[in-house]
Image (cartoon, helix red, strand yellow):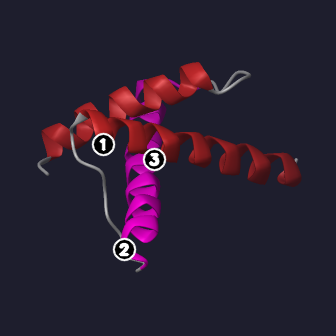
């Protein structure tokens, strides 16, 4: 997948995940983009692990299913980030 598709997928997945997740996440456009790209990797890897049973670093594609998987991954990333930063505080 080319870099423009990664940016689009990251923005869409990050924005949707921030709208779904309760509470305030803060951050701007760049953090939303990074959250979505991380979510695409997390979601794609988990989906590949459940589908094939092997752990490979994979990313979701720019499709409806790929966006759903990326949003789920972004929600997991938000949860883990909030859990990690709460312990440090």
Question: Residue pushed farthest bottom?
Answer: 54
Q: How many marks?
A: 3
Q: Which mark is residue 52?
A: 2
- The rendered magenta stretch, by its main secondary structure, is classed as helix
Of marks 2 and 1, the one in the foreground: 2
Magenta-colored span? 27-53
Please report contact status of discs 2 and 1: CB closer than 8 Å, yes or no. Answer: no
Residue 77: horizontal and vertical position, in percent? 58, 48
Residue 51: horizontal and vertical position, in percent? 39, 66
Q: Does 73 appear in magenta?
A: no
Instruction: Quickly name the residue at label 3.
Output: 39
Of marks 3 and 1, the one in the foreground: 1
Give the camera-side residue of 22 and 47.
47
Residues at marks 3 and 1, CA–CA distance in whole angstroms = 11 Å
Q: Is residue 27 left or right of residue 21?
A: left
Residue in view at x 46 percent, y 37 percent: 71
The kind of secondary structure element at disc 1 is helix
Mark 3 surroundings within 10 Å by alpha-carbon count, few (fewer than 14), some (14 through 19), many (20 or more)? many
Residues at marks 3 and 2, CA–CA distance in whole angstroms = 19 Å
Residue in view at x 56 percent, y 25 percent: 18
Instruction: Quickly name the residue at label 1.
Output: 66
Of marks 3 and 2, the one in the foreground: 2
Give the camera-side residue of 49 and 75.
49
The kind of secondary structure element at disc 2 is helix
């Amino acid at each position: 997948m080319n870099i423009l598709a990664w940016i689009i997928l990251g923005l869409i997945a990050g924005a949707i995940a921030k709208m779904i997740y309760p509470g305030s996440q803060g951050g701007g456009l760049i953090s939303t983009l990074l959250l979505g790209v991380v979510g695409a990797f997390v979601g794609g890897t988990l989906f590949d692990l459940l589908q094939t049973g092997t752990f490979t670093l994979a990313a979701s594609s720019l499709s409806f299913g790929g966006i759903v998987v990326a949003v789920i991954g972004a929600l997991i990333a938000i949860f883990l980030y909030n859990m990690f930063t709460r312990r440090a505080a």
